[in-house]
Image: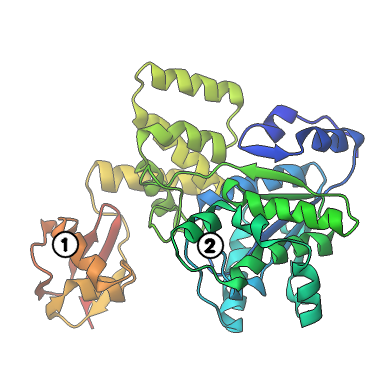
């Protein structure tokens, strides 16, 4: 496979580190078709823009003719990986894993070409694993090697528990690389240890070690922590277009350039121009609007992106009600508004609803709520935050 490759765009933009970069370039110049491994544990069904950074890079390689291999971690999802959170994930049932995996893949293929992706489930090989196989695998590494992992070392030093199953996780992820004969594995910088274990295990088992491409961790809408569902600072790729656009508009101004760099395709020269505009004190609003359009267009289409922008201007900037408001049936009278918000799926708990009311973020027919319980008549419009509306109608 010989073709002209923009190495700067492919190997530098949106890339934190490549191991080993010179070897990868040599294989690309030679024209080898690489097997690109991307694995996921279906502990959660949803993908956000933080995942999209790596998936976009995967798609760039795929468009050059390389083979994407998606590993569905239906086996390791029951173990738990402490990456970045310093706690174990809960074990899932088989049905939960299947449901999460189906949803995840629907979102995955919004970015990566489904027709050119090989999907593999871990149970193909781990479903037949015996105790002897596990012992043979663990004999190739030492406890000291695994305590070198930053998250493990911090928890060990603090006296917090580390289960043996967690120590197995990097080994099992590495064994995936062996089984699919991975030439290159993708992951965030917080996955570095696991990715390198894959290289070591491949070498020990007589294969060429995979190249490793790590992408930066996208900072979430709070402007402080990496994007995460558990922190609530995420923008989901399957969220409604208007919601995606609105969340993009809420990011701190200092994240505009990094979002353009990591989750859009605007040319590098134009990116430099944007950088100069911001340095010269340009109004960030037009830049955020363009960023919102770029992201929604990728996930949906251009017309939908424009509709999302029009909705934002009308509802948020001009403070008008949206053109279409969803009706939600209630028993009118004295109601618990946090309970209504929970039942309608606008919050995850009554406590979250109560906090939003206390913070002044909830209105009924344009009047800010002061109490959690209030009298509700049919037809009133409930507004939660800046962009979520419901019309409460009598059952």
Position of residue 13 in the picture relative to residue 347 (left or right): right
Location of the N terminus (image quadrant): top right
Compared to residue 229, the image places residue 127 above or below, namely below
Q: Quadrant for residue 385, please give it.
A: bottom left
Position of residue 152 in the picture relative to residue 249 (left or right): right
Q: Which of marks 1 and 2 is nearer the N terminus?
A: 2
Location of the C terminus (image quadrant): bottom left
- Circle 1 — which element? helix
- Residue drawn 31% across and 67% down? 347
Compared to residue 15, the image places residue 272 above or below, namely above
Q: Quadrant for residue 8, please give it.
A: top right
Which residue is the site of mark 2?
82
**How many neighbours does mark 1 have within 10 angstroms: few (below 14), some (14-19), or many (20 or more)?**
many
Q: How far apart are marks 1 and 2 (CA)?
A: 34 Å
| Residue 364 in view, yes or no | no
| Residue 139 in view, yes or no | yes
Q: Whole-percent x and y of residue 353?
A: 23, 67
- Residue drawn 91% across and 56% down? 206
- Residue drawn 45% across and 55% down? 228
Q: Whole-percent x and y of residue 155?
A: 48, 60
Q: How many marks?
A: 2
Position of residue 243 in the picture relative to residue 302 (left or right): left
**How many neighbours does mark 2 have within 10 angstroms: few (below 14), some (14-19), or many (20 or more)?**
some
Q: Which numbered disc covers residue 357?
A: 1
- Circle 2 — which element? loop
1 and 2 marks in contact (CB < 8 Å): no
Compared to residue 378, the image places residue 14 above or below, namely above
Q: Whole-percent x and y of residue 50?
A: 52, 49
Considering depth in this image, is 267 or 262 the residue closer to the camera? 262
Considering depth in this image, is 216 or 56 the residue closer to the camera? 216
- Residue drawn 35% across and 48% down? 311
């Amino acid at each position: 496979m010989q073709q002209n490759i923009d190495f700067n765009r492919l190997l530098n933009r949106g890339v934190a580190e490549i191991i080993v970069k010179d070897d990868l370039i040599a294989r690309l110049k030679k024209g080898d078709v690489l097997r690109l491994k991307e694995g996921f544990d279906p502990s959660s069904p949803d993908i956000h823009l933080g995942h999209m950074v790596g998936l976009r890079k995967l798609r760039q390689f795929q468009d050059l003719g390389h083979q994407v291999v998606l590993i569905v971690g239906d086996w390791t999802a029951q173990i738990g990986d402490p990456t970045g959170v310093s706690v174990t994930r809960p074990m899932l049932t088989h049905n939960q894993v299947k449901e999460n995996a189906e949803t995840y893949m629907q979102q995955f293929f919004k970015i990566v070409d489904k027709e050119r992706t090989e999907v593999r489930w871990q149970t193909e090989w781990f479903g037949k694993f015996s105790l002897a196989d596990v012992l043979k695998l663990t004999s190739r590494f030492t406890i000291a090697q695994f305590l070198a992992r930053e998250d493990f070392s911090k928890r060990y030093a603090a006296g917090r528990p580390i289960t043996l199953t967690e120590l197995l996780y990097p080994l099992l992820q590495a064994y995936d690389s062996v089984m699919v004969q991975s030439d290159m594995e993708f992951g965030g910088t917080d996955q570095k240890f696991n990715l390198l274990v894959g290289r070591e295990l491949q070498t020990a088992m007589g294969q060429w070690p995979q190249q490793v491409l790590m992408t930066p961790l996208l900072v979430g809408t709070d402007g402080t922590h990496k994007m995460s569902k558990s922190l609530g600072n995420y923008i989901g790729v399957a969220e409604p277009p208007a919601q995606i656009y609105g969340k993009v508009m809420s990011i701190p101004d200092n994240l505009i350039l990094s979002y353009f760099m990591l989750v859009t395709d605007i040319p590098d020269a134009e990116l430099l121009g944007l950088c100069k505009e911001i340095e010269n004190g340009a109004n960030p609003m037009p830049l955020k609007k363009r960023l919102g359009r770029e992201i929604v267009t990728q996930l949906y289409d251009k017309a939908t992106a424009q509709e999302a922008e029009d909705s934002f201007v009308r509802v948020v900037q001009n403070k008008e009600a949206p053109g279409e408001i969803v009706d939600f049936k209630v028993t009118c009278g004295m109601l618990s508004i946090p309970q209504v918000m929970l039942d309608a799926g606008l919050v995850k708990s009554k406590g979250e609803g109560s906090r939003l009311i206390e913070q002044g973020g909830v209105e009924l027919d344009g009047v800010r709520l002061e109490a959690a319980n209030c009298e509700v008549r049919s037809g009133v419009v409930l507004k939660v935050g800046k962009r979520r509306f419901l019309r409460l109608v009598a059952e």
